[in-house]
Image (cartoon, rainbow, N blue to C red):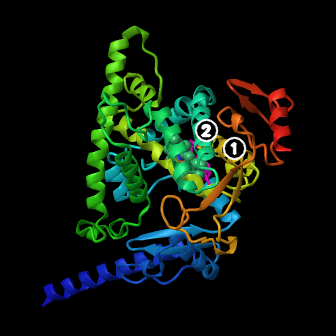
């Protein structure tokens, strides 16, 4: 009898202690307001097809700092300039981690790419490499010729299809993909290679791979929120991630092999030409704080995907506002995890946009009124238009200038002081003779 009573007492004491501890913890944590979560799913029932819109609607009800429960994980959502500052500036360190998602595990070599890697020594080193080696002002300048060539190609193609409706996104995706693949991988995989060159992927396969990578990195996989049902792969995303990672690995191995054999062949005369070369060089550096392994190089080189779908972000505003200092507009994020590729992103977007505006008059196809344009969007890593814009370009300048004149800065927009043109291979200012010729033609 005595034993039974002491067992019951011990049991009651344990339960009371657990309850008390959880009460105290809850009281101490003082979480922000938010909707009451359901068991297992939390508040996932309130998150629709466009999660950013669902969160915005919830924030209208619960305020600029709220907590929602994504399955097993609490998610704190800041929805005002002040909260953005608090999260991305004041408490930057606390929020510098990344959730461990299935996409990071399966598509980026177990979180080896900078985007998904947890905050720590590996990420710090990767970040340093990005800022010092990959996206330094000097490096970006050395790739200027690539941006100019690809822009020229775009202008030529648009000029050829003038007067006909075109899907603008296809052309813009091509420019960004070509620029990034040439800078990172050393060549573009979006055009058919010559007869005798062995193709590792066709241009269609390459684009499909990147689209899939982009899509899978932006999905809300239910297993990420409720880990104990992840093995069921209810949405089929994990299966797709595994298939994709095999394809990517085969492709990246080929790219690395090609780069390594050039390095061997050229021996002492070898110089890094693209970012894969730079990464391979870094990987062989014995003094690196954290060793950069082969899969790290492959994961890094996948970074190019980030760029190809950013066109929805073209905005006619002062670019200094895009750098995240005022926390009003954060297309590149802010704080420690802010996009390290933003100088490149801005350069390509500004140059492309200014050339599209400077070189062409844009109208909607016959019979389409601007009120009819759909502004619907799709959720993902970026938020592209659901129905891509189809428009008609009419040249504004004489035909002979098209392959030669590239506006390198946003000349159409008043806040930009610089106004440089590239005539042939020579830079010039607004008052140079070739520029005058262009302006006269415009008039
Ligand atoms: C207009 C073009 C671009 C936009 C709008 C953009 C936007 C972003 C955003 C919003 C983030 C997340 C920031 C955060 O978590 O706070 C990010 C991260 C990142 N971006 Fe970009 N990006 C662009 C171009 C690029 C380019 C060209 C590259 C490189 C080729 C790049 C590489 C990265 C990397 C590596 C990260 C992860 C950084 C980290 O976690 O430390 N981005 N970008």
From what the image shows, is residue 8 above or below residue 273? below
- Tell which of 118 and 300 is nearer to you: 300
Left or right, 381 with reference to 16: right
Label 1, label 2: how many angstroms apart (C-alpha)?
Answer: 8 Å
Residues at badges 1 and 2 in contact (C-beta under 8 Å)? yes
Within 10 Å of disc 2 (Cα), the crowding (few <14, some 14-19, many 20+) is: many
The mark that comes first in sequence, 1 or 2, is 2
SS state under label 2: helix
- Tell which of 64 and 1 is nearer to you: 64
What residue is shown with label 1? 355
Residue sitting at the far bottom: 1
Left or right, 376 with reference to 281: right
Q: Is residue 164 magenta?
A: no
SS state under label 1: helix
Residue 93 at least partly seen: no
* Picture disc at residue 334: none
- The residue located at (56%, 69%) in the rendering is 77
Q: Is residue 336 magenta?
A: yes
Magenta-drawn segment = 331-341
- The residue located at (59%, 49%) in the rendering is 161
- The residue located at (52%, 47%) in the rendering is 307
Where does the C terminus fall, quadrant-wise?
Answer: top right
């Amino acid at each position: 009898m005595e034993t039974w009573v002491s067992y019951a007492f011990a049991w009651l004491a344990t339960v009371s202690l657990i309850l008390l501890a959880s009460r105290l913890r809850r009281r101490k944590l003082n979480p922000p307001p938010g909707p009451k979560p359901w068991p297992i799913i939390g508040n996932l029932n309130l998150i629709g097809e466009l999660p950013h819109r669902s969160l915005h609607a919830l924030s209208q009800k619960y305020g600029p700092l709220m907590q929602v429960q994504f399955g097993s994980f609490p998610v704190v959502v800041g929805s005002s300039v002040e909260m953005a500052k608090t999260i991305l500036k004041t408490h930057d360190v606390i929020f510098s981690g990344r959730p461990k998602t299935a996409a990071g595990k399966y598509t980026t070599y177990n979180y080896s790419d900078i985007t998904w890697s947890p905050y720590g020594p590996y990420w710090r080193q990767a970040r340093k490499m990005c800022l010092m080696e990959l996206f330094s002002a000097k490096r970006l300048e050395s790739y200027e010729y690539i941006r100019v060539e690809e822009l020229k190609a775009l202008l030529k193609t648009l000029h050829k299809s003038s007067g006909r409706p075109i899907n603008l996104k296809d052309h813009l995706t091509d420019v960004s993909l070509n620029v990034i693949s040439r800078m990172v991988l050393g060549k573009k995989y979006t055009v058919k290679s010559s007869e005798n060159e062995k193709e590792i992927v066709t241009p269609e396969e390459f684009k499909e791979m990147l689209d899939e990578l982009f899509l899978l990195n932006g999905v809300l996989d239910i297993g990420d929120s409720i880990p104990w049902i992840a093995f069921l792969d209810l949405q089929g995303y994990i299966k797709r991630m595994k298939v994709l990672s095999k394809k990517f690995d085969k492709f990246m191995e080929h790219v690395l092999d090609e780069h390594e054999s050039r390095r061997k062949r050229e021996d002492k005369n070898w110089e890094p030409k693209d970012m894969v070369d730079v990464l391979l060089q870094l990987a062989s550096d014995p003094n690196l704080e954290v060793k950069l392994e082969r899969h790290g190089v492959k994961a890094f080189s996948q970074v190019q995907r980030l760029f190809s779908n950013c066109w929805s972000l073209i905005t006619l505003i002062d670019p200094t506002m895009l750098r995240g200092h005022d926390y009003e507009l954060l297309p590149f994020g802010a704080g420690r995890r802010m996009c390290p590729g933003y100088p490149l992103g801005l350069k390509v977007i500004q140059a492309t946009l200014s050339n599209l505006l400077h070189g062409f008059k844009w109208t909607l196809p016959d019979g389409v009124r601007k009120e009819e344009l759909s502004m619907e969007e799709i959720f993902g890593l970026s938020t592209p238009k659901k129905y891509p814009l189809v428009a008609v370009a009419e040249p504004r300048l004489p035909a002979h200038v098209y392959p030669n004149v590239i506006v390198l800065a946003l000349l159409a927009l008043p806040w930009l002081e610089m106004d440089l043109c590239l005539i042939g291979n020579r830079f010039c200012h607004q008052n140079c003779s070739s520029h005058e010729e262009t302006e006269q033609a415009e008039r």
